[in-house]
């Protein structure tokens, strides 16, 4: 009788869970190409995970708990200490010894990397475990560059982005302030370029600064900066939306935002590392293949002193995450995109 009651309870719980969305066919093919998890020798100990989340928003809690539940089937003597208090605290916890594994919500910042090196005397070990999303909030959606729909520009290279959004930047071809500097002619040639950007000292802009401006603090002084705005009714209008609303009224403008905020008056530009490599839009395929230049990369960070290995439990847990099963859970229980096979095998090699 007890077994019957338990079975009915489990069926009711399963029925109450919302169905998972269908996986994009390209993503599904990528997952099928990944190696399955083959457990190594049984490990024991405590994995202390810090990272992406907050006391109010448990962004990856379901994912980490699923990862650990599946991992523990093969390693029942391992325990999980779960402290997802935010990316900013994760590397500090690792450097102080409070944590053994940091799962960040974005790339490790130069400041966090410097802090770890000062505390430990060597650099943190970075293992890539996911790609950011195309357009899912809180899962590092891709930075996209937009122009007004009437603008005929075909695409931009990273160097051209540096010229437009930076100032005196060594990464760019020199400052680009009018549209002829990007190859437009006729009535567009001498038209000034008006950049619209996130506030330049917030995380979104810091990523762009590191990836495009070679970590230069010098932005185009004509840039108009935006931050989220809270309405009297409590509704928050995101800076990405405000940027594209402004751009919709300015045919001479260019803005950094994301397609989730797009409106009919703006158009996302395909981007390229170089003109020879061709312009590509931000899609699941181009992000996972790292062909789109402004893809976000999600790392796990561990403390591994030079000449020493990782703790067996952390190493084995990362082996599971970097497997078909771990990446399938990632796709089903978060907004992140999986690694492709070549990247996953490269990152697994770091665990040796």
Image (spheres, rainbow, N blue to C red):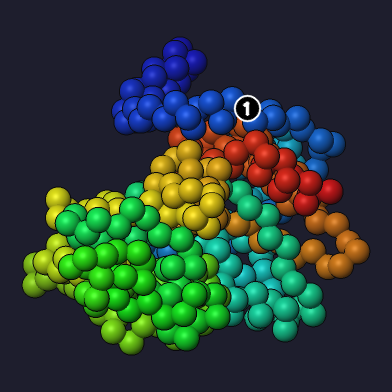
| Residue at screen point 44% across, 13% down | 4
Of 33 and 155, nearer the camera is: 155
Q: Is residue 193 left or right of residue 109?
A: left
What is the x, y in percent for residue 168?
47, 86
- Above or below, 48 against 69 in this view is below
What is the x, y in percent for residue 135?
35, 49
Of 182 and 342, nearer the camera is: 182
Secondary element type, mark 1? helix
Residue extending furthest toward the right: 307
| Residue at screen point 33% across, 23% down | 15
What is the x, y in percent for residue 334?
44, 44
**Does residue 316 appear in this view?**
yes
| Residue at screen point 29% across, 64% down | 184
Residue extending furthest toward the front: 186
- Above or below, 286 against 113 in this view is above
Q: Which residue is mark 1?
A: 33
- Above or below, 259 against 205 in this view is above
């Amino acid at each position: 009788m007890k077994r019957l009651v338990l079975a009915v309870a489990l069926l009711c719980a399963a029925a109450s869970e919302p169905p998972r969305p269908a996986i994009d066919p390209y993503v599904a093919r990528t997952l099928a190409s990944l190696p399955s998890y083959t457990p190594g020798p049984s490990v024991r100990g405590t994995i202390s995970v810090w990272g992406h989340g907050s006391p109010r928003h448990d962004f990856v809690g379901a994912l980490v708990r699923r990862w650990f539940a599946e991992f523990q089937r093969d390693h029942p003597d391992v325990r999980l200490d779960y402290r997802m208090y935010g990316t900013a605290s994760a590397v500090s916890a690792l450097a102080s010894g409070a944590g053994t594994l940091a799962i960040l919500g974005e790339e490790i910042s130069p400041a966090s990397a410097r802090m770890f090196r000062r505390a430990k005397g060597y650099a943190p070990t970075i293992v890539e475990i996911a790609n950011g999303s195309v357009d899912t909030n809180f899962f590092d959606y891709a930075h996209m560059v937009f122009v007004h729909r009437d603008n005929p520009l075909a695409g931009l290279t990273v160097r051209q982005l540096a010229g437009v959004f930076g100032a005196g930047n060594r990464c760019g071809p020199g400052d680009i302030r009018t549209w002829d500097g990007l190859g437009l002619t006729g009535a567009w040639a001498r038209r000034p370029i008006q950049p619209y950007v996130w506030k330049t000292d917030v995380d979104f802009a810091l990523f762009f600064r590191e990836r495009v401006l070679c970590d230069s603090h010098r932005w185009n002084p004509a840039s108009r900066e935006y931050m989220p705005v809270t309405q009297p009714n409590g509704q928050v209008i995101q800076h990405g939306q405000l940027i594209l609303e402004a751009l919709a009224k300015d045919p001479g403008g260019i803005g950094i935002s994301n397609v989730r905020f797009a409106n009919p008056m703006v158009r996302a530009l395909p981007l390229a590392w170089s003109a020879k490599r061709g312009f590509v839009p931000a899609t699941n395929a181009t992000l996972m293949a790292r062909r789109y230049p402004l893809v976000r990369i999600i790392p796990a960070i561990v403390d591994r002193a030079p000449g020493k290995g990782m703790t067996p439990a952390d190493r084995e847990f990362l082996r599971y995450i970097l497997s078909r099963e771990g990446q399938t859970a990632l796709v089903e229980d978060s907004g992140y995109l999986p690694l492709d096979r070549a990247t996953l095998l490269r990152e697994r090699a770091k665990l040796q």
